[in-house]
Each structure stands twice: as structure tokens, then as C-alpha cells.
Image (cartoon, rainbow, N blue to C red):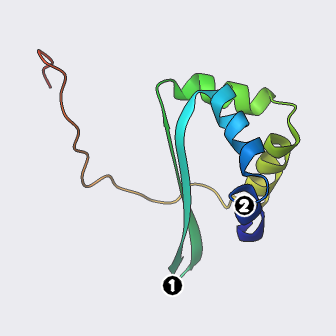
Amino acid sequence: MVDWLRQVDGPRRLEALESLAAEGVEHEAAMIVDTSDGPIIVYAMQTDDLARSRVVADESARSVDAEHRAVMRDADDGPARAEIVLDLRPEEPGATR
């Protein structure tokens, strides 16, 4: 998986950026964290419409997207236990929490 992601961030970067544009994704990042239970991937996407982005990616016929789905499916061992401990962002004027 790491080698494939490096390909996406290297020689296939333009292809991946075209895919992100089609999905409406502004930023995508991945990192590997080594843990005592083995490595985990932390994957983050910035988009205004996550549901739409997922649909476009899932239905895409682009080779980079098909390969991405396969690589992630092979690496997926199910959801990890996670807790958001900090979530700061500026509020819009007039917005209440």
C-alpha cells in the first residue's frame, strides 16, 4: 500500500489530482502510524460534500480510482477504536453551538 500511495503522490500525481477535482475533494492526506499492534493508516479528506465525494469515487472508472479501491480494501482490517479529543474551527458569524 505504501508503495502504491507513493506512486500516486509521485508519477501518478496529475491523474490523482484530476480524480480529486472530480470528487470535489480539496485536500487528501495519508500517513502510516506504527503501533504495538502493527501499522495503521490515518487518512484524511477535506471536502464540502463527503457523501458526494464517496459516490463519485466509488463509481469512477478511472484506473487510479479502481486501484485505490482495491489497495484500500486489501489494507482494511475494519474500523479502529478512535476518539476525537480536539475539534477546533472558527464559527460562522451568528452560528451557535
Taking the spot 45% from the left edge, 59% from the top edge, the residue there is 81
Q: Are marks 1 and 2 in contact (CB under 8 Å)?
A: no
- Say the numbered circle drawn on residue 63: none
In the rendered image, the quadrant that contains the N terminus is bottom right
The label nearer to you, 1 versus 2, is 2
Q: Position of residue 26 (x, y in %)?
A: 52, 35
SS label for mark 1: loop
- Say the numbered circle drawn on residue 10: 2
SS label for mark 2: loop
- Say the numbered circle drawn on residue 36: 1
Return the residue found at the far top: 94
Viewer-proximal residue, 94 or 21?
21
Taking the spot 84% from the left edge, 49% from the top edge, the residue there is 67
Q: Position of residue 12 (x, y in %)?
A: 78, 52
Q: Position of residue 27 (x, y in %)?
A: 52, 42
User: Mark 1 or mark 2, which has the lower sequence index?
Assistant: 2
Taking the spot 56% from the left edge, 33% from the top edge, the residue there is 25
